[in-house]
Amino acid sequence: TNTDNAPHTVTNRVADSSPPAIGGEFKSSTLTNGGTFDHTFDTAGTFQLFCEIHPNMLATVIVQ
């Protein structure tokens, strides 16, 4: 859920790419305040993500 006043995306990032490159696992639409996105991971692993609007915003999801 985007609780910020700025729009954001939740986009899969090609591992360790700099600048971030879009991967093929998941990609949200632009989320404005209150917008939500969810994704179900079918396999264990480490998944990197970023915001396409603010590419310095990076995160990692670890699925066990």
Image: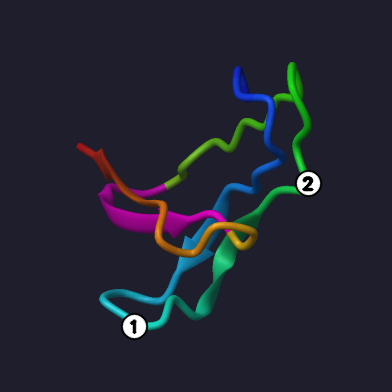
Is 61 situated above or below 24? Answer: above
* Membership of 48 in magenta stretch: yes
* Membership of 31 in magenta stretch: no
Q: In which quadrant will I find the N terminus?
A: top right
Q: Amino acid at mark 1?
A: Ser
Q: Residues within 10 Å of mark 1 (few under 14, many from 20)?
A: few
The x and y percentages for residue 36 are 70, 25
The x and y percentages for residue 60 are 29, 48
Q: CA distance from mark 1 to mark 2?
A: 21 Å
Name which residue lies at 37% across and 49% down. Answer: 43
Q: Amino acid at mark 2?
A: Thr
The image quarter containing residue 25 is: bottom right
- Is residue 31 shown left or right of residue 9? right
> Counting residues from the N terminus, which is met first, the one under dot 1 or under dot 2?
1
Q: In which quadrant will I find the C terminus?
A: top left
Q: Label 2, on which residue?
A: 30
Helix, strand or loop status at disc 2: loop
Query: Marks 1 and 2: CB-CB under 8 Å?
Result: no
Residue 1 can be seen, yes or no = no
Name which residue lies at 46% across and 45% down. Answer: 42
Q: Main secondary structure of the magenta part?
A: strand
Q: Label 1, on which residue?
A: 18
Residue nearest the observer in this picture, 21 or 5: 5
The x and y percentages for residue 56 are 40, 61
Helix, strand or loop status at disc 1: loop
Q: Residue furthest toward the front?
A: 5
**Highlighted magenta segment, given as a residue range:** 43-51
Q: Residues within 10 Å of mark 2 (few under 14, many from 20)?
A: some
The x and y percentages for residue 20 are 44, 76
